[in-house]
Amino acid sequence: MRLPLVLLLALLASAAHAADRLTVEVHPTEDLKAVFATVESVHETRARVRIAGTVAALRITEGDRVAAGQVLATVDDPKLELQRAALDARLRSLDAQQRQAGSELARARALRASGTGTQQRLDDAQTALDVVTAQAAAMKAERAVVEQQLRDGEVLAPAAGRVLRVEVIGGAVVMPGEPVAALALDTYVLRLRLPERHARFLRIGDPVLVGDRGLAAATEPAALKRGRVVQVYPEMAGGQVMADAEVPALGDFFVGERVRVYVATGTRDAVVVPPDLVQRRMGADFVRLADGREAPVQVGGAVPAIEDRPGGLEILSGLRPGDVLVRP
């Protein structure tokens, strides 16, 4: 039993020793360029009035989040209520006429059955009932139209999103088709604009790194958000190529807000080592070689991890491929 235990301890020691050593190699590294992108809504739509009238209630303000079908405002037309009341009165009148015509038809049938009434009178009574019934059906359809117009006074959100602009005020007179509010739908992208010399490097699916909100200082590489280019527009404007990138959790940003973004504009060979292998003393940077010597190095910028490539510090000079580094 002791031999397998000794072998296991030896393997663990060997693995730990290998984890503390790094052989310097040159790897292709993305050449990242920092640009400012703006948060844009993929689609923008407007909630519009469907009937003429006066804005009786306005239930939103700029910045509100709304759901699809939510009532944003109410438009009131007093004439519609008057039309409905008039139609209700006419329907009551037709209902009375319909009951009377039904009674006349019943008497005409009884007289015809007893032989004291004529067929013409029976036909006239049947026709009178049919006419009143048709008039009542037409009146009910007309009333349904007025009811629908009253419901159309509610201005509904066509889709879920955020209110960008409210374009009316309470009490304003509006006509059908006038916009009440502009909505940004709940799908946001980062819109990038790059100089045309970088256009040949930009492809759909390329990764992008996103810093903190606004024009803040550069973010630490580990805190950068990851995104991906989803659209490259074929037309250039002002010597710039435009592209859209999808990044999670953009809904909390302002539409039009500027964000620092890092995009790959090509690749180059570089030596990248983990930060914990570099020591800084008296303003100079050193790494420890496997033979125990310390070698001064010139450190470049931090290289963030992209996809399956680990990040670290770029070494500009002081190391050669094949050098073996150990942790200090």
Image (cartoon, grey):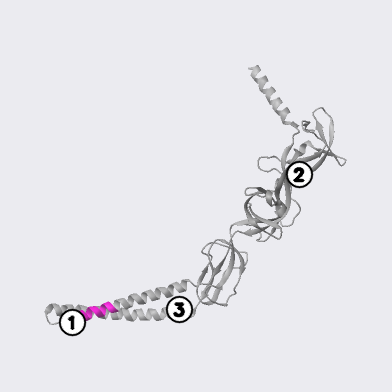
Q: Position of residue 158 (x, y in %)?
A: 53, 64
Within-10-Å neighbours for mark 3: few <14, some 14–19, many 20+:
some
Asked if the residues shown at circle 1 and circle 2 are in contact, with their CB atoms under 8 angstroms apart, the answer is no
Number of the label disc, if any, that sits on residue 270: none
Q: Position of residue 4 (x, y in %)?
A: 64, 19
Image vertical order of residue 323 relative to residue 155, above or below: above
Asked if the residues shown at circle 3 and circle 2 are in contact, with their CB atoms under 8 angstroms apart, the answer is no
Residue named by callout 3:
81
Residue named by callout 1:
120
Image vertical order of residue 177 relative to residue 307, above or below: below
Q: Amino acid at mark 2?
A: Ala
Q: Quadrant of residue 115?
A: bottom left
| Residues rendered magenta in the picture | 119-131
Asked if the residues shown at circle 3 and circle 1 are in contact, with their CB atoms under 8 angstroms apart, the answer is no
* Label 3 vs 1, first from the N-terminus: 3
Residue drawn at (58%, 68%) of the image: 181
From the viewer's side, name the closer residue of 272 and 68.
Answer: 272
In front: mark 3 or mark 1? Answer: 1
Work out how far the residue at label 1 is from the one at label 2, CA to CA, in angstroms: 104 Å
Name the image quarter holding the C terminus: top right
Residue drawn at (65%, 47%) of the image: 206
Q: Position of residue 63 (x, y in %)?
A: 62, 64
Image vertical order of residue 247 relative to residue 47, above or below: above
Q: Position of residue 38 (x, y in %)?
A: 68, 58
**Residue 121 counted in the magenta span:** yes
* Label 1 vs 2, first from the N-terminus: 1
Residue named by callout 2:
302
Image vertical order of residue 158 relative to residue 288, above or below: below
